[in-house]
Image (tube, rainbow, N blue to C red):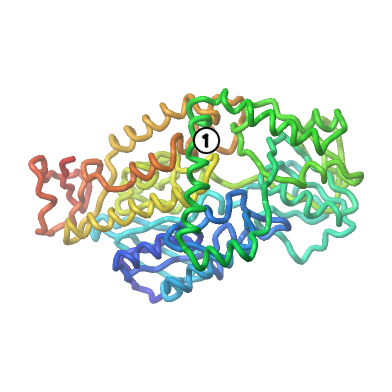
Amino acid sequence: MTEHEHVRVAVIGSGFGGLGAAVRLRREGITDFVVLERAGSVGGTWRDNSYPGCACDVPSHLYSFSFAPHPDWPRTFSGQEHIRAYLEHVTDVFGLRPHLRFDSEVKMMTWDREKLRWGIETSRGFLTADVVVSATGPLSDPKIPDIPGIDSFPGKVFHSARWDHDYDLRGKRVAMIGTGASAIQIVPAIQPDVSRLTLFQRTPPWVMPRVDRAITGAERWLHKQLPFTTQARRGLLWGIRELQVQAFTKRPDELGLIERLARRNMARAVHDPALRAKLTPDYRIGCKRILLSNTYYPALTRANVDVVASGLAKIDGSTLVAADGSTAEVDAIIFGTGFHVTDMPIADRVVGTEGRTLAEVWRDGMKSLRGATAAGFPNWMTIIGPNTGLGNSSMILMIESQLNYMADYVRQLDVLGGRAALDARPAAVEGWNDKVQERMLRTVWNTGGCTSWYLDANGRNTTIWPGTTTEFRSATRRVDLGEYEVLRAPGSNTPGPRTPESRTKNSGTKGAKKVEAGA
């Protein structure tokens, strides 16, 4: 990029959210945009997570864009390499490569009140943009706990999302820290090769069978020849999950049947009562993410595997000490301890109208309007923002809904004309979040008796959407200008939207003036 490059839209990140935004912008006729990517290729979390056994726990035909169906998925649940290849395919088919700026990590984004644009400092230079679409994703920055003694550990240490493929685990004594979605895939993948595997389990997960199989050649041929069959398959997968939502959001007691099935799944593989007791959760299924695996429980029963039903407390040389006092001598530590979800690092790099970072504004918890915009940060949107996560379906559905909202947001700026910006009203943000949190009170994620990564430091669920994907799509179909203040650049003679309630007033903020738009 050149030193003074200016674009209409800057998209941050090239995972599903960023590439989806790029495709949608092109379909809207907008080509004056760039996609800033800190790495050297597209893929987001499906590029970064390349650990052994990495795969998706959402069926393939639902974990793909509706506008880019893929009839040639090899399995019902696809592996990391197939999903990454799909994203590369989307990049090529929709002509996105000219817009990509690799090795361009965003260091800081600062709102210019005078010019109504964002100044963006990257590792490769500076540019400005009228609109920023942040699609960095919640599963992009690994979280490693601050364990006493970790700096003095003489062996190898890495996070599951930063797998060291040059380090040979064969014959090594390995500690797996955590029992989340990554860990239950890693454990069975490495267990046959290591000399000893010690799993440090702070909280056991509920694990259901993974109904995975190869998609037959006949099925793939049918999907290619008759595209509506791919759409029908996707629709069926979506419909089943929509019907499940009520149990998660309104009637958690109905999950008891699923819980009994999970117990049977464990009992079939784990015959030792003592081990089964360690692996049995004490919270309602669904409170934490339900995991899918046919190989996790069998791997834990192998002779070279130990399950420590306690979190890692400290490290003394090569000795790992659990909170219950048990120890293990290891050569390598693998952290499967999740990501910075409720404290997204990108928030430290966004400076809004009042000179405060988004992280400062979100100090007491993330809040946004319709999962997309934040008060005091004009023309800035996020994909997979606060309370847009799902507990039982495909995030691609939520991403596409937010892309609808993004497209209409840009259209509204076109209608306003001139140098204009939209800033979410604080009352609108608060009103939206109050309703979301009120609905959250009866969900299994809040009532199930667990502590999960869905909750922030204050115990508030700022990640999950407490409804169906249909409801969210309806809520994000159009931008309501009544929820925004219209900012005008100084000296701009372009009128605001002509509604009976519209009026211009001094915002009290240096630079731009605000136009209150009627609902």
Say which of 501 and 151 sits in front.
501
**Residue 372 x %, y %:** 37, 47
What's the amino acid at mark 1?
Gln
Q: How many marks?
A: 1
Can you name the residue that lies furthest to the left here? 500
Q: Is residue 22 above or below residue 203?
A: below
**Residue 421 x %, y %:** 24, 54
Image quadrant where residue 117 sits: bottom left
Residue under pointer 1 = 244
User: Horizontal placement of 366 versus 81: left or right?
Assistant: left
Residue drawn at (59%, 47%) of the image:
339
User: Horizontal placement of 235 versus 354: left or right?
Assistant: right
Rendered-image quadrant of the C terminus? top left
Q: Is residue 30 above or below residue 428?
A: below
Q: Is residue 128 above or below residue 454?
A: below
**Residue 276 x %, y %:** 81, 31
**Residue 230 x %, y %:** 50, 58
Q: Residues within 10 Å of mark 1 (few under 14, many from 20)?
A: some
Residue drawn at (34%, 35%) of the image:
432
Residue drawn at (77%, 49%) of the image:
187
Instruction: Say which element carries label 1.
Output: helix
Q: Is residue 24 above or below residue 337?
A: below
Rendered-image quadrant of the N terminus? bottom left
